[in-house]
Amino acid sequence: MARVVITGMGIYSCIGQNLDDVLESLREGRSGIGVDPEREEFGFRSSLTGILPKPDLTKVLDRRKRISMSQEAAYAYVATAEALKNAGIDDNFLDSREVGILYGNDSSALAVVEGVDLIREKKNTTLVGSGSVFQSMNSTVTMNLSVIFRLKGINLTIAGACASGSHSIGMGFMMIKNDLQDCIICGGAQEVNKYAVSSFDGLNAFSVRNDSPGEASRPFDADRDGLVPSGGAATVILESYESAIKRGAPILAEVLSYGFSSNGDHISVPNIDGPKRSLLMALDLAGVRKEEIGYINAHATSTPIGDYNEALAIDEVFGDHKPYVGSTKSLTGHEMWMAGASEIVYSVLMMKNSFIAPTINYDKADEASSRLRISNKLVNFKFDHFLSNSFGFGGTNSTLILKNIDTNSY
Amino acid sequence: MIDTALIEKINTVLADEFEVDADMIQPDAPLMETLNLDSLDLVDMVVLIEHNFGFTVVAKDFAGIKTFNDFYHFINSRLDEKKETPK
């Protein structure tokens, strides 16, 4: 069984489009939430969203590569290029090794809608162009990045709703741990546009604090009124410890365990038992005592029932030990398919720099969150183990536990 | 005789779409090789023609086109047919 480490990370999010900017936003408690005026006109209840531009790759990739890329594939390209660079992985490594990709993504609505609209208008399928199909498929990120980076290992998209990014890291961890691969690009991507989340808005799941975007995402706060959709992409390079040591790669953290479960219950309403089993499985497999967990990056999206049940699950599992609990979604909104991966990046950044970002807008505890140790202020705190929860529609749950490797700072 | 303005327009849209140096586009130069086209790019050529010249073709219409000159004649003749077709 191989040990699995993170040797590189990259991020493209509404709180920063590289690791340096994101680190600063986490420290400053800077919100990336804003208003998309088109949404109200389109019939949304909520106009709130994470705000980020589509990267301009004109001078970076040739036309053939660009026209096949969806919005989320472009985000993922930028995050992955940063991660590979930080991992010290160059063209020679990519060409000589069997590097894989497991990336979380669960929609490509913008490409589908725009493509179908064009066909409807022109009544000719060819006039949608050659790139549409590669933008529209759920595997748009992995199919594009595997070609761009000439990857020769496992090549697969993980679709697990809002836990997709976390499951992708968990599955990568399992493949490396079992000696099937020694380097896998893992991550999660989430498109940011009105088509992607319109039906989600229809479930009354989004905050309607349209007049105060920075205060809308308020995980665990008693006055929370729903999540704020967001997106981008986050990449981590998973590698066997042996491979990383052999090539002198920077080692940022070790993945100790991957817990998972399914609620087997309601399609959208989370429960307590499923997440609890995922937490317990991760703790058991990690071989660490719960007292060693210094920080929990909660799934906590700012929905009334989700945060409530997660707080109860954490409380039931951790009991008297009260690790710091935070939700970076207070800053980023809910990055959905990306969230499980981005929150690993955020948490590793915080662990390497010995602080916990404020859970902004957590002003008043409710009955469940009052049982947890949550701070709405920056906490300077050194911790060497953290746990990250990600849950999704259909009751899919994923929990990752990581350990600091103190040889490299970011 | 093909109108010079039409040739210039064709050269411009091809250079822009397929991102090649306009100087590489010469009447006797091979179209596919110069523009580095594969089968997927021919789909985009269909889109380019519809968008810029207002008529629809299918990829197999390109079968006899070897050079840019062939392409100019192809576009020109289709535009002539379009003008002659009663509405």
Image: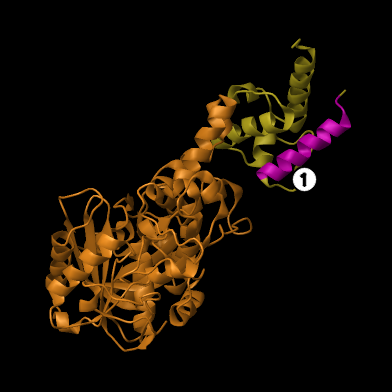
> Which chain letter matches label 1?
B
The C terminus of chain A sits in image quarter: bottom left
Q: Do we see residue B56 in this rendering?
A: yes
Q: Measuring from the top left, give residue A48's x and y in whole percent.
A: 48, 59
Residue located at (40% from left, 74% from top) = A361
Q: Residue at x 43, y 71 (%)?
A: A331
Name the outermost residue toward the top: B86
Q: Which residues are magenta?
A: B2-18
- Residue A354 occupies quadrant: bottom left
Q: Main secondary structure of the magenta part?
A: helix
Q: Amino acid at mark 1?
A: Ala
Left or right of residue A239, residue B34 in this image: right
**Chain A palette colour:** orange
| On-image quarter of the N terminus of chain A | bottom left
The reply, left or right, for residue A360 in relation to residue A289 is right
Q: Chain B's colour?
A: yellow
Q: Which residue is mark 1?
A: B22
Q: Is residue A377 above or below residue A13?
A: below
Residue B25 coordinates in the image, percent (x, y): 76, 40
The residue shown at (77%, 19%) is B77
Q: Nearer the viewer, residue A104 or A143?
A: A104
User: Residue A20 lies in magenta, yes or no?
Assistant: no
Q: In the rendered image, which quarter is residue A321 located in?
A: bottom left
Q: Nearer the viewer, residue A337 or B72?
A: A337
